[in-house]
Image (spheres, rainbow, N blue to C red):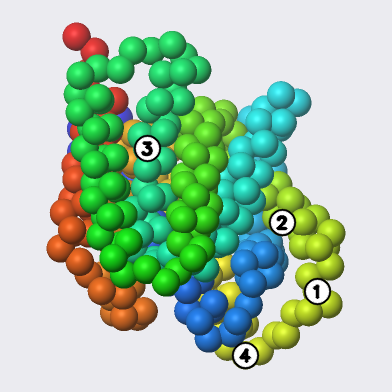
Amino acid sequence: MTLSKRSAYFYSGFLLSIGGAILFSTKAIWVKLAFRHTGVDALTLLSLRMLLSLPFYLVAAWLASKKDQAKPLSKRDWYWIIALGILGYYLSSLFDFIGLQYISAGLERLILFLYPTFAVLLNTWLFKSKLSWLQVIALLLTYAGIGLAYYAELGTVQHNAQFYFGSLMVFLCAVTYSFYLVGTGKMVVKAGATKYTAYAMLSATAGVFIHFLSQQQWKSVQMSQQLWGYSIALAIVATVVPSFMISSGMKKIGSNNVSIITSIGPVSTIIQAAIFLNEPILMAQIIGTLLVIVGVILIGWQNTRPID
């Protein structure tokens, strides 16, 4: 591949990643609006999101299976795809939706953005790699930023008894998503971006539907035109399109570069939350966000440095 083609390949991966990150950042906005205007519960909204996303992933899975160059996957690979799909888009999403009932969209995105640091710690634990001094500084900056933003948020939610519970749910979302991220970096190379994304999402959809049906949620669902609108936006704008964009970007430029580029996510969410949800933008929140972004960029830069 020539230098110009390589540059174009990287540039396309960059655009896919940043576009996917911005679209993903709209998720919290759609969820908060749905909670505010329809009174829907977290599990029902998540089920609607997956139901409306399902046809797109079924088509993607069928198209991926028809490709002549599609690589056959081992039984072990399929187990990993199923497990990662359940972690990344069922458990992680459920924790996130529950948490968004009790904390602001801006804080949700900041807590969720801890996942790159968790991925570093996970790789250190699983593969026995040592943390460099730069990674340690990055981790300290990231957690200091979260702590500062969290402290600022406390002053605005004195009467919210479920604030800490909501924070814990989003924290668990970040933990489970970090497992998904680490596994995705390896499996997307084996399966291909489209095939991996489609089957991971189908696995997550099965988990959500089983949970929904076991809770007999359908008996109390009151569908409205407004709820359909939010659910469609959540499924298409904030799920289907960005999931394929991020997976394609990851295949082109690698998961570490994608982690750096998607640092735009918290900023995008905070700005959107101020515009559409009337959430205040606090100075401490801005400083905390900057610290988190610097930490994540340092982590990504460390992981993409050439080995001496």
Asked if the residues shown at circle 3 and circle 4 are in contact, with their CB atoms under 8 angstroms apart, the answer is no
Q: Amino acid at mark 3?
A: Pro
Q: Secondary structure at mark 4?
A: helix
Residue 202 vertical position relative to residue 123 in the rendered view, above or below: below
Q: Secondary structure at mark 3?
A: helix
Q: Between disc 3 and disc 4, whose residue precedes?
A: 3
* Residue denoted by label 2: 208
Please state which of residues 180 and 1 is positioned toward the viewer in this rendering. Answer: 180
Can you tell which quarter of the image residue 41 is in? bottom right
Residue 278 vertical position relative to residue 70 in the rendered view, above or below: below
Asked if the residues shown at circle 2 and circle 3 are in contact, with their CB atoms under 8 angstroms apart, the answer is no
Instruction: Give the crowd class for mark 3: few <14, some 14-19, many >=20 residues within 10 Å.
Output: many
Q: Between disc 1 and disc 3, whose residue precedes?
A: 3
Q: Give the distance between the C-alpha atoms of the residues marked 4 and 2, in whole angstroms.
A: 23 Å
* Residue denoted by label 4: 225
Residue shown at the point (34%, 41%) measured from the top left: 259
Q: Amino acid at mark 2?
A: Val
Instruction: Give the crowd class for mark 2: few <14, some 14-19, many >=20 residues within 10 Å.
Output: many
Residue shown at the point (25%, 25%) measured from the top left: 135
Q: Between disc 2 and disc 3, whose residue precedes?
A: 3
Residue shown at the point (70%, 85%) measured from the top left: 223
* Residue denoted by label 1: 218
Asked if the residues shown at circle 2 and circle 1 are in contact, with their CB atoms under 8 angstroms apart, the answer is no
Q: Give the distance between the C-alpha atoms of the residues marked 4 and 1, in whole angstroms.
A: 17 Å
Please state which of residues 300 and 57 is positioned toward the viewer in this rendering. Answer: 300
Residue 20 located left or right of residue 65? left
The quadrant the N terminus occupies is top left
For residue 116, which numbered disc appears in the image?
3
Q: Amino acid at mark 1?
A: Trp
Q: Between disc 2 and disc 1, whose residue precedes?
A: 2
Q: Secondary structure at mark 1?
A: helix
